Image: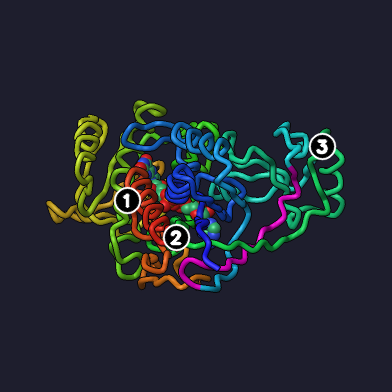
Amino acid sequence: MSNNSILVVGGGFAGITAALEAAEVGFEVYIVETNPYLGGRVAQLNQYFPKLCPPSCGLEIQFQRIKNNPKVKFFTMAEVVSVAGGPGAYDVKVKIRPRFVNANCTMCGECAKAATTTVASEFDFGLTGRKTAYSTHLFAFPQRYVIDAAACAPGELDAIASACPYGAVDVSDAEKTVDLAVGSIVWATGWKPYDMAKLTNLGGGKLKNVVSNMQFERLAAPNGPTSGKILRPSDGAEPKRIAFVQCAGSRDENHLNYCSYICCMASLKHVTYIREKCPDARVTIYYIDLRTPGRYDNFMQKVAADDKLTLVKGKVAKIVECECQSPILTVEDAVTGIKGEEKFDLVVLATGMQPSCAGSKLPVALGMDDDGFVGDDADKGLVAAGCAKLPLDVMKTAQTGTGAALKAIQNVVGR
Ligand SMILES: Cc1cc2nc3c(=O)[nH]c(=O)nc-3n(C[C@H](O)[C@H](O)[C@H](O)COP(=O)(O)OP(=O)(O)OC[C@H]3O[C@@H](n4cnc5c(N)ncnc54)[C@H](O)[C@@H]3O)c2cc1C
């Protein structure tokens, strides 16, 4: 039987936008999100261009709209397992992992104090640890802790439950399956950072003072591992010379065979973080082409006026480290043709955005190209949005979310 509800898979900027656009014109929407929170990668940024606002600024408005709209229902720690049926009448099975924390949670943090095990923090890309009872960030939505029961030591889960003054820890929570009947599906599963450990010549994942651009976002974030101080991971010293390596793995047939669109802008934005937090630090950006499309060029011109910033057109071939763990770059200047070595205190690899579904099989009949980007089948009510479809900034991501909502609505109206 046909159904005019809409399923949105992925609760990042694309998915939230698609969901709200559809719900606010009267359609019932379900968001299925694998993380314990909504907001996607934007939640992990320190600030986002072009206005350089903190992520809470854009996201909290969206969360309010979700809270105020009974047409939007969402599942976190959830994934689509299978999709059966056809256009206008899809039967979707969703698996929900246990959170072990119910709606009584007040975010008081007593559970985290009782937790004794620490594991690497996914939210901070391993730059710090998190407890087995944790909240990823202050403005996490929903405002509710998570218990990582699988990582708990014997007896730890019970100790965590006893420490909660509100009876919010439910040790009996278990995996559930939910069946949804929907007419259209928006696929908005976004991106993951390209695995820098694959960039062996650049010391990715091996050299302590070579970090990825997303790790740099966390280093600069006030809620990050260093409370917003930009410090070298090896010794906690403030870096005086910082280099950015553009196209780290991007536009390279051995890694990501495309331009990720935002990495040049992200590194220029990172220069503004450095200027604010390490005012005297000297910065060099090594690039193949600086790509700052459209009005982003104004941002580039402004940042490029910084007299402690040097822009070098050149490809970084290799990074090794000296005894004090400072990275040494081998670079060929593309203008002078001179090959040389430069030593820095900290290096940031501008790694690209890889579609999060790359390398996996979709549970829905949507096409995927060789890079893992998902295509549309709009006539069947199957629509892709955001970085699941192509690399985008937040503004264009939101536009594709709106477009996807319209296509999803067109498919369910009149059935
Ligand atoms: C270093 C860096 C800095 C950046 N800075 C900026 C900036 O300053 N300004 C700007 O405009 N853009 C910036 N971007 C780009 C920005 O992050 C993206 O435009 C934005 O995240 C795209 O949103 P999205 O919803 O498409 O994807 P995502 O943010 O990735 O959200 C996708 C959501 O889907 C979920 N998901 C994934 N798989 C599944 C699944 N199978 N089932 C259910 N849920 C799933 C994920 O958990 C996630 O919550 C930056 C990117 C990088 C790499």
Query: How far apart, in angstroms, are the residues tagged by discs 1 and 2?
Result: 46 Å
- Residue 9 in view of the camera: no
Q: Does the residue labelled 2 lie within 8 Å of ligand 1?
A: no
Where residue 135 appears, x then y in whole percent? 65, 41
Element on which disc 2 rests? helix
Q: Residues within 10 Å of mark 2 (few under 14, many from 20)?
A: many
Answer above or below: position of 347 versus 84.
above
Q: Which one is nearer the viewer's eye here, 79 or 301? A: 79
Which residue lies under the disc numbered 1?
Answer: 245
**For the residues marked 2 and 3, what is the alpha-carbon distance in whole angstroms?**
45 Å
Q: What is the tally of numbered marks visible in this picture?
A: 3
Residue underneath mark 3: 164
Marks 2 and 3 in Cβ contact (< 8 Å): no
Quick one: label 1, few (<14), some, or many (20+) residues within 10 Å? many
At label 3, counting other C-alpha atoms closer than 10 Å, the crowd grade (few under 14, some 14-19, many 20 or more) is many
Image point (56%, 35%), residue name: 68
Which element is circle 1 on? strand
Amino acid type indicated by mark 3: Cys
> Is 161 positioned to the left or the right of 198 in the image?
right
Image quadrant where one finds the N terminus: bottom right
Disc 3 is placed on an element classified as: loop
Q: Residue at x 35, y 52 (%)?
A: 403
Q: Locate the C terminus by quadrant.
A: bottom left
Q: Which residue is drawn at 55% across and 34% down?
A: 223
Q: Which of the two discs, 1 and 3, labels the residue nearer the N terminus?
A: 3
Residue drawn at (26%, 54%) of the image: 331
Which numbered tag is attached to residue 412?
Answer: 2
Range shown magenta? 86-102
